[in-house]
Image: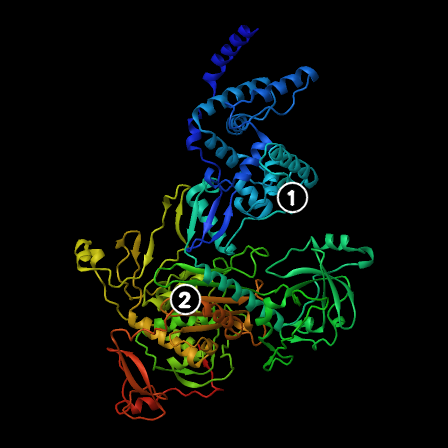
Amino acid sequence: MALLGGIALAILWAIIVPNLPDITGLKDIRLEVPLRVYSADNKLMGIFGERRRIPVKYEELPKKLINAFIAGEDARFFVHPGIDYQGLTRAAFQLIRTGEKTQGGSTITQQLARNFYLSSEKTYLRKIREIFLAIKIENAFTKEEILTLYLNKIFLGHRAYGVGAAAEVYYGKTLHELSVAQAAMLAALPKAPSRINPISGPERALIRRNYVLSRMHQLDYLSEAEYQQAKNEKDRASYHGPSVELRAPYLAEMARSEAIQKLGKSAYTGGYSLHMTVNSKLQLAANLAIKTGLDNYDRRHGYRGAEASIDLAANDGPEQWREILQNYQEIAGLIPALVTEISDDLALVYLADGQTIGLDINSVSWARAYIDHDRREARPKQVGDVLQPGDVIRISRVAEITEASETPELNEENEGLESSESPVQTDTLGAGPQWRLAQLPAVEGALVSLNPLNGDILALVGGYDFQRSHFNRVTQSLRQPGSGFKPFVYSAALSAGITPATLINDAPVVFNDPLLEKTWKPQNYSEKFFGPTRLREAMIHSRNLVSIRLLREIGIGNARNYIARFGIDKNKLPQDLSMALGSGSLTPLSIARGYAVFANGGYLVDVRFVDRIENASGQVVYSPEHTRVCPDCISDEQTSEASPEEATVTEFKPLEISSINDEAVSTVSARTTENIRIGREILAPQIIPASNAWQMRSLMRDVIRFGTGRKALELKRNDLSGKTGTTNDQRDAWFSGYNSDIVTTVWVGFDDSGKLGGRETGGQAALPIWNDFMKTALIDSQDNYPQMADGLVKIKIDKETGLASKRTGKDIIDEYFEFDNLPDNEASDETDSENIDTTEEDDFEVF
């Protein structure tokens, strides 16, 4: 029988072994590892892929975890040659005795062979192939290599592949943080991971865990005391999503899309790491600023009521309440809750985790009932004025919204601001966190911050919460920028020879346009007119009528072509004078990129959010070319080696004022540096002179010092410039501001373009968000206002006439001019100054 058995084994070996898969590939096996996205400072921002896997090396495997798998799966792993003869004998005896094939007898090496090369069907041929393949693997690999491959490959339920991912999925821990009992639970999963796991089948998983623990005790891996302690440990497994260190879902989604575009579907499985340009500190500040600002706006306009109301009589008890709350997810820290009881001074509120808390009148005092965007009901006097039993509401910890509670709110008449109450609330039911009634804001917002020297995105928030809406309002939302667009028009005017001291008449105008159903009568926000106004003063106070006359003077076609140099799509700009008031529809990102030109001295940088993509071995497989501002990088040597076209530096010619001509081509020339590269960097082209950019910085600095951006003074900086933006009927509120190191744009509005409210201007709704973010962004930044650009001179002028003056006094101020475009002085132009149009308010100029 032995001889016959040996002959049979030799025949099988001769037939099967030559047809076995080549196992040399195991040495370079590429496990399906998901895409991981990191910030510039290596904070994990997201994981993308169908399979969660965290590869680990043998040295990173805790001894208790190795012992648990050895005890549960293959006690003789370190001594057998790939197959366990004892286990096979037991399985064969069971087959002879019962006639049934049973699971078992497979070593870890056999399971590895099956997982990598064979199917899971139960046939004798597959089992024989598995045995021979296991022997072959054992001859080619060490035990440590085999165990490492097995523990990284094995499926352990809930999309977790490998022990590293399983520890995170079930316990939210690393392998070394697992207890003995938790390690045993992971070792209990390979038999039936989809059915027997601590989430889907906790009772059966616990039985299997205790079996593994008993085997560990029998094999002397655990003492009696350790065994009893582990056996009595309560399992607290629950599903844990990827351990994201930095929450920036809008950016992470942008990264995912970019990875798919560059790498294809392999991005999800190739173990790639995508490193972004975002700064984690600034991103956290942006997240908080948007949430706080939108919550503040929402409370200023009142409580819109419960999200739902249910019949408590038909849903009497915690089990039914919990089931109801399962339909509502926590969003941005706002927790769903159910009002179960109420009295005049207290409401009892049930949470999905079984906790009951109390809300007193201080907890709901802000919740004046919403009437419309400008009106609210009176302040509630008792809890019952706001809440009723059966209401499904949102609550938030007071610590998370303390700052919001101190923000000013609009009074009922909407004639001014009144200070909001800042209640001090105690948890009525005893010690613990303090709570307050909250609601999901209906309003939305966006923030994007760039490095103006290279276009890197430093922070981006595309909405109140990604879970609620995946729509990225920074990159996808086309909104009217309102007065935030005026700096581009003013820059065009400066290029055309208009100066900051030029007087433009701020007087009524009427437009008769056959394409419009009625005449257009634009006016200033204050609905007042101020007559002849210097350009600087018009920027400071955002005078609409001055901007319209300015655009009319330089020409719509000229202005559109000029503004296109800022990277703004000319096709999105209207071909009429309403463009002066920001009537075109643009994204916040395009506005921020345009403002970066003013911040960096006149250079157009490309926006970048991906720094590099690395493969599983850490090699860079993709690093995009990107622009950088470097005025001094074009050395004589580089210029001499460049082609004539590349080496030429064209002078900037003034924008010529002409009649309105949409086909007119701007005569502004750009510095030709597009083809000059330094490594992966492309020198950013200069699109406006440094003198123009500096003058615009000076104008917008005064917007903050004296005008609509005064709230930014709370930052106590001298180097900030910016511009508010508000559209008709306050449907969009903006603030864009910058210094030499950072540019940030904030937008607030409704997705359906609803009205924000009578006083919700850019300075009221958007600027506070900008301030909150910039407080963090500027912490490590020196206050450094740049020196006056070459080609400019400072001259004293009369602030009423804009003419150069040798006099002194309170009417004399400093102004900055191009050296070849100086103002007339008072003595020589006295007659001309008397000829300035001083149209009365009731005299309309018709265009």
> Left or right of 169: which side holds 523?
left
Q: Which residue is drawn at 34% across and 91% down?
A: 834
Residue 196 screen position, x and y as percent: 65, 37
> Left or right of 195: which side holds 114?
left
* Residue at image mark 1: 229
Which residue in the rendered view is the most extreme toward the right? 313
Judge whether residue 14 can be spotted in this image: yes
Res 740 → quadrant:
bottom left
User: As displayed, is residue 357 above or below residue 116?
Assistant: below
**Of label 2 and label 1, which has the lower sequence position?**
1
Q: Which amino acid does label 2 sit on?
A: Val
Q: Identify which residue, 213 or 521, lies in the foreground.
A: 213
User: As displayed, is residue 747 above or below residue 546?
Assistant: above
Q: Residues within 10 Å of mark 2 (few under 14, many from 20)?
A: many
Disc 2 on helix, strand or loop? Answer: strand
* Residue at image mark 2: 743
> Left or right of 105: which side holds 831?
left
Res 311 → quadrant:
bottom right
Q: How crowded is mark 1: few (under 14 residues within 10 Å), some or many (20 or more)?
A: few
Q: How many labels does the image show?
A: 2
Q: Identify which residue, 99 or 697, lies in the foreground.
A: 99
User: As displayed, is residue 640 above or below residue 560?
Assistant: above
